Image: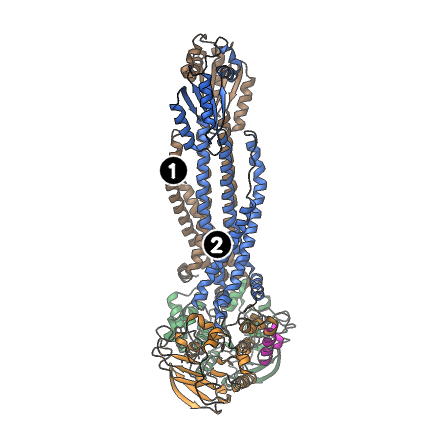
Chain colours: A orange, B blue, C brown, D green
């Protein structure tokens, strides 16, 4: 898998949220994205799952140019990308398990199976007991973990984690980093945006990218080597388009 | 690929979770269809009333003094051959005199000295239900020019007033029905749109995690169809109740004047159309309303 | 303590920010008032029509052969003293004969041999606009029992039919207006409620930072009043346009039958009432709808 | 000022969110509240500004029992309490400055003055330039800082900060902790809920309270001494009730 992004002008109104960001990420990498508040981390992640369209440059995922994707293909792209949103984006008046299962439901997976897998994912973030509680009744950290469970339950090809530990205590943060690490080692490309120095210090990333005011100002090798050197996979456009590429099966 | 069961469950969940939105939409659809239904039933019965009284529409054809009975029969035959004529009756001078006497009541003695055939013979022509004003005027013109006809007496002043009034009522009912239909369309549309608007975040989130527009829309459409069905059924029920209450009153008021007129209700076909209309209203409304937010993301 | 300027600004901001919610509420209020307005204008004109035709309501009091002129004058005086009687006219036997002759037209020769005072004298009594059926019947009863009166002739068949019809129209208009008013109240209420529901988070946040219920409510109430004003104005405008289009048609249709009848529009007072009604509707709707979320926090 | 809280049963459904929490906080203290996700930190803070009613026990603020406060008095209580919500609770479709100024607007302060003070508060969190931007257009960290500016702009008698640095980079976190410290030194009682060990390490708190499953499991003295020993102030009920106690004036 190969990801290429570069922008002439940033998205998001008059502000240049991103400027000439150029980044190649290989399959199975775990890239840490840091930078001060307002650096453009979230915007960069949002362009990858086509929630934001760049004014210039191109983003290539699995050989496909995201910025020129047909609108109708976007859902199928997103099914291969798990996203942990900074503001969670949970359905507040539904149960935790419904929120997690939705990523499977939209692919037409049977309710029984989707609920079993969702429960498993909730267990992985330590919330198996809270499965039936409404999201609005849960604490900040619990909500964040539901967002994490939702992002990983589909075993996506790409995982975008935007500040996934902002509401978690050190112990839980550690567990979550372990979870992301193991997901990445199984072949999922992980991009993790954070400003928590503890996360930066503890995550076994393959690369550390520092953004400032929309530009990459530093890029270091991480402690971990990528499981595979960055290479171009043969594009699987029909997989992305038709939604038949089910990473869960593809990867196991 | 995706089981319909999922959407049914989602739609039901949505309806349970936000009963207020459902009630607003169901209410708007019910009220809209009820008003249209009232207008339709009114128009329907005004039409029936017009026909009923229209049946009584009579022409009196006074024959010339020198017209023979054979001439009268020929004219009657000619009239009977026309489809807009329902019945033709010959009134001899003697019959006419008897009638005048009856209409004078206690003052009938007045006619004691009058010779039996002083009054002219006449033909009483009753037009069929289907005959409209234009056809009636055509017949009047025809008879006016016919040999042996002295004068044609067409519709009395009161009958004409009544006809005009019924016509006005019909026009009014149609006009009002049109306003109501448009107005209700607008209200149903905006109510459904507001309901979807209140749930725009849900739609946004679903799309962010990869739901197709069809997936997002399906529960809303199902919900809309259900709202329409329930709204339509409520409207028809309310209409039926109104009818049950109002019909005997109206019939009673008319009974003293006319032989008998049932105030009609909608036919089974029209009832079905009402339900189908409700479902379509809900379905189209939801589809259009959801479209906004599904497209936007 | 808090300047009204703040609330006006907030209300305007709210209206700019969520035009869809405003349009839905304004639309619901406009449609509601328009329908009520249509019903009121219809009822108003049916009433006028009834009065207009009702004015022609006449009794003919036939006097006994032996009743003197003095007796007739006494009766006439008695009748004129009653407020439900508009005019009384004495018809002498000679006048009656003349009239009968006119009504017989070309067959008037029939009366040539009849002595001038063969027909009875009579009083033609015209009831006032305000007189209703009950009063008319009372007078008929009174006259029937009076000395010197032979017979009282009251309302022809067509006039009666017309009266019944007009009565039905009036009842129908009132019934329909009532349904419409209730239905529209429901729709306006649920539309405003939905609009507030869509902004419940805003209300919650304001209260969390210490806003009083009154502070939270004020912009909504102002908004509601403005929606009502605009909705009311739109309804009256639309009603005026309908009236401008329909009135000449209806007047034309009636003109051939009756002397002249203007189809009336609402009076300035009624127009003001419409606007006030709109404002109240918006105000009360917003207040009630906001109450839910303000109380809940 | 004196705060007393104790619960027989926790609020929030069947879960015992808080159990027999007993805590006295004096004027000008800066209390750190830590504990794992779901410990009850947020619930504890919410009971103080009457967003949650305890099933048992009582909360006394300035001599008034919050749990028995008339509903109509709650707004006036809240005007003396600044809250930084864990999930921000900002009006998303309004500008940053509108969000900050609202706490002043509801007290009837003139628009000109309220905007000037809001701008000042935004400056204190480094967002003076973003004043006119809509909240929904701002990054997670920017939104958090607006929430902070809103909580402090009224110079409240009590400041409740729920995870105020979860979305901020270390530098900004530091600035915010400094801000809270200086506010506390000027007489405002601050209660800061966090699981960020860096915050715990750096904040110059007077006390450190550790919650676990709704119970206080540890309480230590902090590095800083309270500016005044815990004492009972003469209650100012009319101030809380009538909203005439404007801390801004009272403290300056
Ligand atoms: N929709 C938008 N419209 C206008 N400006 C935007 C929009 N989204 C983001 N921005 C601006 O772009 C800049 C980068 O935002 P972004 O959310 O990417 O930052 P970030 O690195 O994620 O920050 P944080 O760590 O605070 O979350 C910010 O200054 C923000 O105000
Ligand atoms: N409204 C509610 N209904 C039911 N349970 C609730 C409600 N609010 C909170 N809870 C539960 O109470 C417990 C404590 O929640 P609280 O939000 O106080 O935790 P917290 O310490 O703030 O956690 P975090 O650090 O994750 O924000 C949690 O288990 C939560 O699920
Ligand atoms: Mg961000
Ligand atoms: Mg919390």
Foreground of the two, D220 or B129: B129
Left or right, A24 with reference to B202: left
Q: Tell me: residue B115, above or below residue B235.
A: above
How many numbered marks are there? 2
Which is nearer the eye, D157 or D96?
Answer: D96
Quarter the N terminus of chain A occupies: bottom left
Instruction: Quadrant for residue D249, please give it.
Output: bottom left
Pick the quarter of the image with the C terminus of chain A. bottom right
Q: CA gap, disc 1 to disc 2?
A: 31 Å
- Taking C209 as reference, is A172 above or below it? below
Residue B96 in view here: yes
Q: Secondary structure at mark 1?
A: helix
Q: Does the magenta portion include A119?
A: yes
Crowdedness of circle 1 by 10 Å Cα count: few (<14), some, many (20+)? some
User: What chain does mark 1 sit on?
Assistant: C
Q: Position of residue A43 (x, y in %)?
A: 42, 77
Above or below, B169 relative to B229: above
Q: Is residue A37 visible?
A: no
Q: Which structural element holds mark 2?
A: helix
**Would you name the residue on which mark 2 appears?**
B188
Chain to which mark 2 belongs: B
Magenta-colored span: A114-132
Front-lying residue, D131 or A149: A149
The circle drawn on residue C249 is 1
């Amino acid at each position: 898998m190969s990801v290429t992004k570069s922008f002439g002008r940033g998205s998001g109104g008059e502000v240049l949220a991103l400027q000439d960001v150029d980044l190649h990420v290989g399959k199975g990498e775990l890239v840490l994205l840091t930078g001060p508040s307002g650096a453009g981390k979230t915007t960069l992640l949002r362009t990858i799952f086509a929630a934001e369209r760049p004014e210039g440059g191109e983003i290539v995922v699995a050989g496909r140019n995201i910025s020129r994707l047909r609108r109708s293909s976007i859902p199928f792209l997103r099914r291969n990308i798990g996203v942990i949103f900074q503001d969670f984006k949970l359905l507040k008046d539904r149960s935790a398990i419904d929120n997690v299962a939705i990523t499977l439901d939209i692919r037409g997976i049977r309710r029984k199976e989707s609920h079993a897998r969702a429960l498993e994912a909730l267990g992985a973030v330590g919330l198996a007991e809270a499965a039936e509680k409404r999201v609005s009744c849960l604490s900040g950290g619990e909500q964040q973990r539901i967002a994490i469970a939702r992002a990983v339950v589909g075993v996506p090809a790409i995982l975008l984690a935007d500040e996934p530990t902002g509401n978690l205590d050190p112990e839980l943060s550690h567990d979550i980093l372990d979870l992301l690490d193991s997901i990445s080692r199984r072949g999922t490309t992980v991009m993790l945006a954070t400003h928590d120095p503890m996360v930066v210090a503890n995550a076994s990333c393959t690369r550390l990218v520092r953004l400032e005011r929309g530009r990459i100002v530093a890029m270091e090798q991480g402690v971990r080597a990528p499981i595979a050197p960055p290479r171009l996979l043969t594009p699987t456009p029909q997989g992305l388009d038709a939604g038949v590429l089910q990473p869960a099966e593809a990867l196991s | 690929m995706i089981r319909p069961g999922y959407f049914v469950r989602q739609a039901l969940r949505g309806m349970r979770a936000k009963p207020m939105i459902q009630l607003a939409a169901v209410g708007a659809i019910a009220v809209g269809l009820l008003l249209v239904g009232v207008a339709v039933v009114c128009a329907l019965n005004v039409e029936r009333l017009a026909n009923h009284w229209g049946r009584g529409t009579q022409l009196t054809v006074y024959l010339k003094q020198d017209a023979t009975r054979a001439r009268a029969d020929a004219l009657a035959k000619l009239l009977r051959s026309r489809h807009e004529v329902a019945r033709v009756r010959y009134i001899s001078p003697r019959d006419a005199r008897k009638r005048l006497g009856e209409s004078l009541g206690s003052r009938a003695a007045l006619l004691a000295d009058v010779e039996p055939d002083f009054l002219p013979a006449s033909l009483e022509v009753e037009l069929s239900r289907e005959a409209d004003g234009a056809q009636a005027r055509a017949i009047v013109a025809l008879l006016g020019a016919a040999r042996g006809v002295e004068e044609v007496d067409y519709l009395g002043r009161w009958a004409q007033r009544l006809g005009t009034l019924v016509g006005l009522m019909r026009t009014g009912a149609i006009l009002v029905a049109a306003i109501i239909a448009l107005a209700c369309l607008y209200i149903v549309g905006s109510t459904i749109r507001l309901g979807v608007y209140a749930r725009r975040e849900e739609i946004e989130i679903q799309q962010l995690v990869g739901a197709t527009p069809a997936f997002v829309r399906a529960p809303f459409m199902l919900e809309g169809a259900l709202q329409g069905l329930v709204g339509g059924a409520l409207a028809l029920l309310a209409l039926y109740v109104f009818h049950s209450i109002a019909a005997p009153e109206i019939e009673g008021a008319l009974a003293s004047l006319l032989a008998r007129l049932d105030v009609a209700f909608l036919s089974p076909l029209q009832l079905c159309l009402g339900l189908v209309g409700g479902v379509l209203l809900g379905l189209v409304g939801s589809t259009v309303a959801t479209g906004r937010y599904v497209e936007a993301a």
